[in-house]
Amino acid sequence: MAPSLAEPLTLLGRVIDWFIPPQIAADRDMRQQARMFLMSHLFGPFIGNTVPLALYVVDPSPGYPIAVLAASITGFWIFPFVLKAGGRYQTLALLSIQNLMFCILWSCFFYGGVTSPTLPWVLTIPLLSFFYLSAAPSLRLTVLVMFGVNCLAFASAYRLGLSPERHDLPFAALQGLGLVSTVAASLYVAMMAIYYGKAQASQGEIETEMKQHMATAAELRRATEEAERAGVAKAEFLAKMSHELRTPLNAVIGYSQMLLEDAADEGDAEMAADLDKIHVAGQHLLKLVNEVLDLSKIEAGKMELFNQPTDVVGLVENVVAGFRKAADAAGDKLVVDVEGPVGTALCDEAKVRQALSQLVDNAIKFTSNGEVRVAVRKQDGRVFFDVRDTGIGIEEHVLPALFEHFTVGDDSSASKYGGTGLGLALARKLSRLMGGDVTVTSRVGVGSIFTMSIPHSLVEEEAVPGSAAAPAAGDCLDARIEALQELVAANAPAAAPVRRAVGS
């Protein structure tokens, strides 16, 4: 469609749709019929009135028949406003067709009868019936009966001698009138046909677009189902592989620790250095495996909380104590601040420890010869853990994606300081699982502040939907001791030869 025509046609469509009542606009077929009805009644009288105008010009003695014909044709402009006011569409359509029949037969009655130049307009009756009305046979039959009744009425009037004085026009005048009438009828039919064709084409485009959208939606549904199946399969795989991955890693770490102690006793510094590398690498790999498995478990909705009364300050001090060696190696001063009384919180101690450890580890990793300060405070019914560092800081454009999986500050940071970008993501997910969150503020060259929050006190049954009840502390300890005993027993046969090999 040419750009010069697009705007006028759009405006025309808005004008036509303004007359359509909401109850008709809600039905696609009725809306299309109403549009054809309105198009005919808004522009048809302009074309139709050329016939009474031509009659007035060629008739030597024009009288009231021309005035009645012009008034009837002009009356078509009333129908759109009646429809807008809430008139019944099908009743209006039948009245309009009746008015058209009257106009045609009235002009034929006074000007030429069956040879009248206005007789070709009869062909518009079935055309408008097709445009205005539905395909119901009863409505089409009603139009046919109406036409028959009208013809019979005018024929009866002629038979009964009710015919007024005939208007016999000269042959040249009849030719001119016939030409005007035929051209007007042709223009009217062409106008309706073109509008109907464009409406059908537009409807076809809409239907094609709808089919494309439905096909796209079906593809998205299939893709979603496949993604869900893949997610379930991944979760099941990781759950099954959890034991298979962690057990050998624990064995490597345990045996390397024992061999490291034996090498230290023997004074074999070279062997001790190599074993220390194995031990550190094993711990690092186990940490990565645990992070991946925990993230997958959280995403699968299978991570459970075991809430129990926890000494918050003691938990923070224990976490910090575990990083003293790493902080000393980096030349960092590691400080604990307790800002007011915190008390005991009802929470999952292991998961709070895990999330806070990720933040402290991250702060030490990116701070050299500086200070890492871990502050804990209670405020508005929540516990806040602030991990402040004087490290390299984080650029502002990196902050929005900082807690996504496998996201690090930038490539140079990753290559220099290491890290996979899982720790911060896991810390936030764990905190949110417990009803809290992790936020960050940072300035490049000044340092960063990571703040983790958790609820201070929870009703155990309402802690987190689907969370398991907290087991007793003694039961947890017994279960851990039993698991360690099973691990040592399972790998005990391999320990002796290795120990002997180191001692030899």
Image (spheres, helix red, strand yellow):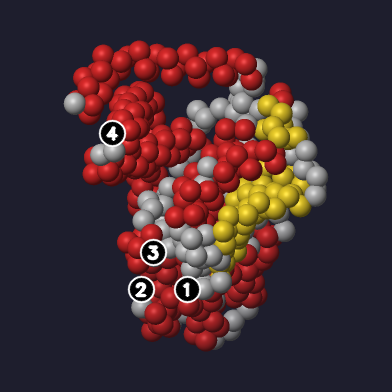
Nearer to us: label 4 or label 3? 4
Of the image marks 4 and 3, the number of the one nearer the N terminus: 4
Front residue of this view, candidates 145 and 361: 361
Q: Mark yes or no: residue 211 visible.
A: no
Relative height, residue 101 to residue 289 (above, below): below
Front residue of this view, candidates 473 and 155: 473
Which residue, given by chain and number where applicable, does mark 3 sit on?
A: 413
Mark 4, other Cα within 10 Å: few <14 / some 14–19 / many ≥20: some
Three-letter amino acid code of the residue under disc 3: Ser
Q: CA distance from mark 2 to mark 3?
A: 56 Å
Of the image marks 2 and 3, the number of the one nearer the N terminus: 2
* Res 16 quadrant in image: bottom right
Of the image marks 2 and 4, the number of the one nearer the N terminus: 2
Three-letter amino acid code of the residue under disc 1: Leu
Which residue, given by chain and number where applicable, does mark 2 sit on?
A: 1
Nearer to us: label 2 or label 3? 3
Three-letter amino acid code of the residue under disc 4: Glu
Q: Mark yes or no: residue 322 visible.
A: yes
Three-letter amino acid code of the residue under disc 2: Met
Which residue, given by chain and number where applicable, does mark 1 sit on?
A: 9
* Res 333 quadrant in image: bottom right
Q: CA distance from mark 4 to mark 3?
A: 40 Å
Which residue, given by chain and number where applicable, does mark 4 sit on?
A: 266
